[in-house]
Image: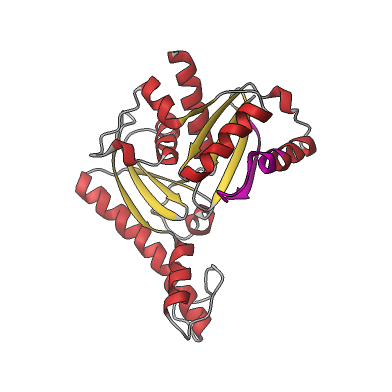
């Protein structure tokens, strides 16, 4: 089985693949102070509950955007699973994924994995919207190359900034409000955040399509994608396992290349 680790700024998602089948996936809060020993206790407990053996893991790939956490993931793979992990960056060098941005080294590993999986699953030019700590809009060419990107504050980050900056505004939960115009402070804030974010999605997708002169297909992923998919036609496909699938594809391609 392949151990695929996608560590973002907020959450770390771990998946186990047997061939092309995702056998299980789990999520844990990202914490760069967490040790490999803590990870293995958490992960092997969940694997045991799913009837999966640690010895079945024969390979590992890691996408990580938190540099301080990398050592723990390396030790987790090497010490506790007995496999040498490969990084997305190493896999890209082995497989020649087209990165057409001005500074390819600045691209997040998760976004490269998203592009690989999206190109393999959908036709033509694409916009991949990833709802994470930041919300990213990656433009993917028909040949799978990453043409450019937009980075916006994530919706949870936006809500927290609103609470922190305004003394009389409360901390609110993210939810679709019952009406557009709120009749109390919480409803007003929820409307501004939720529908404002829908407007951001629709506006940026429309502007990307106008600039490119094409009707690019939109694919949404990330933990908050389901919240918006139902309320805007700008999102055409929801693909919650896009990043993990991209990691598997990168791993398989790198093994073939080597």
In the picture, the quarter occupied by the C terminus is top left
The answer to whether 206 is drawn above or below residue 155 in the figure is above
Locate residue 101: give its quadrant.
top left
Where does residue 93 sit, x and y in percent of width and height? Answer: 37, 24
4, above or below 39, in the image? above
Between 224 and 35, the one nearer to me in the picture: 35
| Colouring convention used in this rendered image of the protein | secondary structure
Task: Give the x, y percent position of residue 25.
Answer: 64, 39
Give the residue displayed 49% in from the left and 51% down from the top.
9
**Residue drawn at 57 percent across, 45 percent down:** 12
How far across and how far down the image is residue 202, in percent? Answer: 35, 58
The answer to which of 258 and 75 lies nearer the viewer is: 75
Residue 38 included in the magenta stretch of the image? yes
- Residue that appears at 25% across and 43% down: 214
| Residue shown at 69% from the left, 38% from the top | 40
Can you tell which quarter of the image residue 144 is in? Answer: top left
On whether residue 19 falls in the magenta region, the answer is no
**Number of labelled discs?**
0
In the image, which residues are magenta? Answer: 22-40
Q: Nearer the viewer, residue 113 or 86?
A: 86
Residue 161 is situated, as x and y percent measured from the top left of the image, at 43, 70
Give the quarter of the figure containing the N terminus.
Answer: top right
Quarter of the view holding residue 22: top right
């Amino acid at each position: 089985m392949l151990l695929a680790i996608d560590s973002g700024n907020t959450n770390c998602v771990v998946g186990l693949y047997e061939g092309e089948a995702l056998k299980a996936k789990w999520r844990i809060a990202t914490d760069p102070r967490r040790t490999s020993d803590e990870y293995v206790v958490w992960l092997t407990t969940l694997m045991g509950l799913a009837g999966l053996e640690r010895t079945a893991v024969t390979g590992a790939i890691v996408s990580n955007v938190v540099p301080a956490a990398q050592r723990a993931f390396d030790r987790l793979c090497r010490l506790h699973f007995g496999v040498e992990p490969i990084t997305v960056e190493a896999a890209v060098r082995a497989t020649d994924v087209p990165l057409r941005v001005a500074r390819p080294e600045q691209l997040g590993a998760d976004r490269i994995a998203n592009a690989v999986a999206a190109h393999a699953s959908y036709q033509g030019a694409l916009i991949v919207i990833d709802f994470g700590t930041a919300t990213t809009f990656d433009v993917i060419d028909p040949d799978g190359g990453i043409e450019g990107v937009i980075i916006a504050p994530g919706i949870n980050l936006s809500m927290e900034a609103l609470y922190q900056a305004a003394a009389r505004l409360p901390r609110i939960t993210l939810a679709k409000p019952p009406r557009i115009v709120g009749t109390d402070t919480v409803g007003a804030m929820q409307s501004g955040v939720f529908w404002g974010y829908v407007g951001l999605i629709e506006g940026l997708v429309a502007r990307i399509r106008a600039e490119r002169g094409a009707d690019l297909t939109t694919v949404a992923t990330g933990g908050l994608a389901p919240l918006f998919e139902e309320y805007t036609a700008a999102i055409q496909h929801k693909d919650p396992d896009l990043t993990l699938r991209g990691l598997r594809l990168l791993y398989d391609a790198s093994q073939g290349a080597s």
